[in-house]
Amino acid sequence: MREENARVAPNGEEDRTMTLEAYADTIVPGRKRTAEDRAIAGVSTDGGAVEAGALELLRWDATGIHDGVDDLADLANTHAEAYAAELGLALDEDVPPFVALDYGHRVALIQRLTTPGHPEKDFWVMLSLFCNMAYDSAAHLHTAEAMAAGHPGLLAMGLPRPGADGLVQFEDYGYGRAFARLHPDTTASGSPA
Amino acid sequence: MSNAVERTDVLVIGSGFGGAITAYHLAAGGAKVTVLERGPWLQSSEFEHDYKLGSSYTRAFDFTVGDGMSVLGGNCVGGGSVVYFAAMPRAPRFVFDRHGSIGRRMWPEAVSRDTLDPWYDRVEESLSIEKQDWSDVSYAGGLWAAACNHSGRTANPLPAAVDNTKCVNCNFMMAGCRFEAKQSLLLNYLPAALAHGAEVRPLHEVQYISRTPDGDYRVHFNIVHDEDYRLQAGSGTIDAKIVVIAAGAGATPVILQRSEAHLGTMPHAVGRYFSGNGERLNTAIIDEEKAAALLGLDRGNGLAYAANAIGKGPTVANWDRLDGSLPEYTRYSLEQLYFPPGLGTILAQVPDATGPTWFGAEKKEILKRWTSWLTIFTMIEDDNEGVFGPPPATGNAHRISQQMLGRGNLSYQPTGNTQKAWDMSDAEVKEILEKDGLAKVMPWTNDLVGAYTVHPLASCRMGDDPHTSALDDRNELRGHPGIFVTDGSSVPGALTVNPAMTISALAERAVPGIVAAAREKGVDVTYGAPAPSGGKAGRRGVLPLVDGLTNR
């Protein structure tokens, strides 16, 4: 049982943050921050979307979804309750319903919400897109600074590190030899005939 | 004098290929030319290697999500030329004889590969397009060529508008080329247009066109905030004798739709027959050991490939299916491409997934192998099935993010022809790259944002049939003399190759007709400028053709 007054009102800031973290962690899963971490499902051994900064990105006004993400968090919880009722799952009431789902059920619910034909699909796709962007491009951070600070997504993917001038440059770029016959109908300028 | 009516001879909407090329020639010929561009005017020093929202990557780009099709386009002075990958092949001969969805030739009788070649030559000179050698090819292009060869196919280095002596292979050309290696319009047609007195106004987004009492056109624009494109900072009008619309195939029809209430009925084909150039992407995850063993690849540093990040976009294509003797909808090119993180990574799917294909634990594992990704870009013949719905309040999209992301009204439901062609090309990419275990391949999912094009076309197309084309064979809008459309929306259909070269050649070809129309309206302008660099070989090739293009 949770302690009285230990949390803000139902669907308050803390619940919403935890729900959005759980959503982001379903898109790109990461490791638990503490043993008690409930938002992170813990199906991965290194940093995922949450550690990459998904909440910072989602709540930044430049994205245009910043003023809608709290509503989406509430909606995710409404869907999670209905999903649990449909499947006969008992949800731990200490955490928001979406967070109470295990990883497999979180995945299944997001698959439902993003399936073509779902009336809210565009919203869930948009939320998923920004969660993914936090990991694959750190769109809330300057790339060079993110890499210097050990951003989990950019480093795991092996994106090139910009130099001191902030620019990426490669001296070696190709194998320097022919690998195939040219198409017989190639014109003198190198185009298809 | 804020109440004074501002006037120009020729008002050009958009500063990409269709706008910059026409603006240059008209200004050089003596007309007063004003170019309105909805995006910012970025200098080379502002082109950053940074994925943060607000960097040049997001300032210069527009990603418009539609219903069944999302469109990626330029949004800056220079338009698509600033963000594109500079691959400049000519369209194969059979393309001009395509029937598409209308059962008869959809290109104007006057346009064929033979009649367009002199105009292609003119563009080749003006943009310094070079035939590329194998030594210019990136690791990713070399890998694709080797894989094509391993499966008994040919492969070609792509002609490109890139100065290889300046290129640092950063693969950031979608954010603008910092090193001025990519020959964008900022380096040729646009400075030449400015030198001849043309005026370019960034952050001016045209909303609609009306008539003036004396029979000219009045162009209505909003001024867009320079950082947050969702905000507007005023509006205004400019009167012009001639209007050239080149706002891009995702925006030109929307401006015309909104103008219908003021100008009268638009041709039926305005906002219809949109083509995504038949584009589709596949992501291969290369087995590095197999790449070494099967293809003999060796970067000299112990790695066979692991070079997804290195290069200059597409450098090698397979053209074996570009064969005019094959049936329509079975011809396509398969081109090695680079696709940056942020815009497309989420659409790449996990091969042999046991769970979801585009997100989750298995997706994270393939993201960790990102350096070994090879992206293959397919361009098939689609069915021109895109249709624009009613225009949004302003611009061509409801803007969601401060930059880059918006929701538009384009609907695209792939026909059986398009879907079969995609399936066929997907199967061939898989056959080439999965041979002997070289890679695992999956196409991008269309379930999230629909199909995806970086080369929108045909939404206001040229043709001979007034029922299925919006423009005549000289790019003039049917029923609205003095309005010309010269961007990708004028191209009748999918080209099976990258379209910038063809869009540019058609824009060059449209200029004599625009000059003639301007002269009829009393503008003192002539045709015949050399290339922006001063080169005259291209002009020599087209001068004999000019007379045939000046009569309605």
Image (spheres, rainbow, N blue to C red):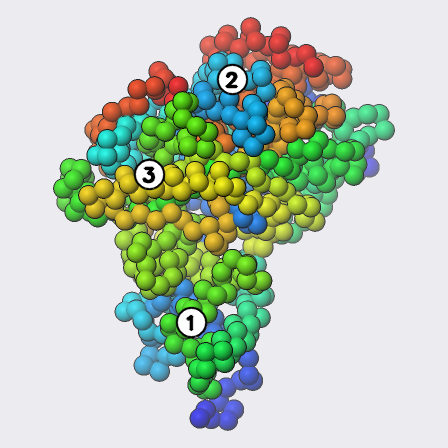
Q: CA distance from mark 3 to mark 2?
A: 29 Å
Same chain for marks 1 and 3?
no
Q: Which mark is residue B112?
A: 2
Residue where numbered disc 3 is placed: B428
Residue at image point 49% right, 75% down: A83
Q: Nearer the viewer, residue B329 or B536?
A: B329
Could you classify mark 2 by the number of other residues whose Cα lies within 10 Å: few (under 14), some (14-19), or many (20 or more)?
some
* Type of the residue with mark 2: Ser
Q: Is residue B19 above or below residue B259?
A: above
Could you classify mark 3 by the number of other residues whose Cα lies within 10 Å: few (under 14), some (14-19), or many (20 or more)?
few
Judged left or right of residue B79, residue A190 is left
Q: Nearer the viewer, residue B254 or B203?
A: B254
Q: Please say if the residues under marks 3 and 2 sit with CB atoms less than 8 Å apart.
A: no
Q: Which mark is residue A106?
A: 1
**Residue B544, percent across and down?**
55, 6
Q: Is residue A169 above or below residue B267?
A: below
Q: Nearer the viewer, residue B100 or B472?
A: B100
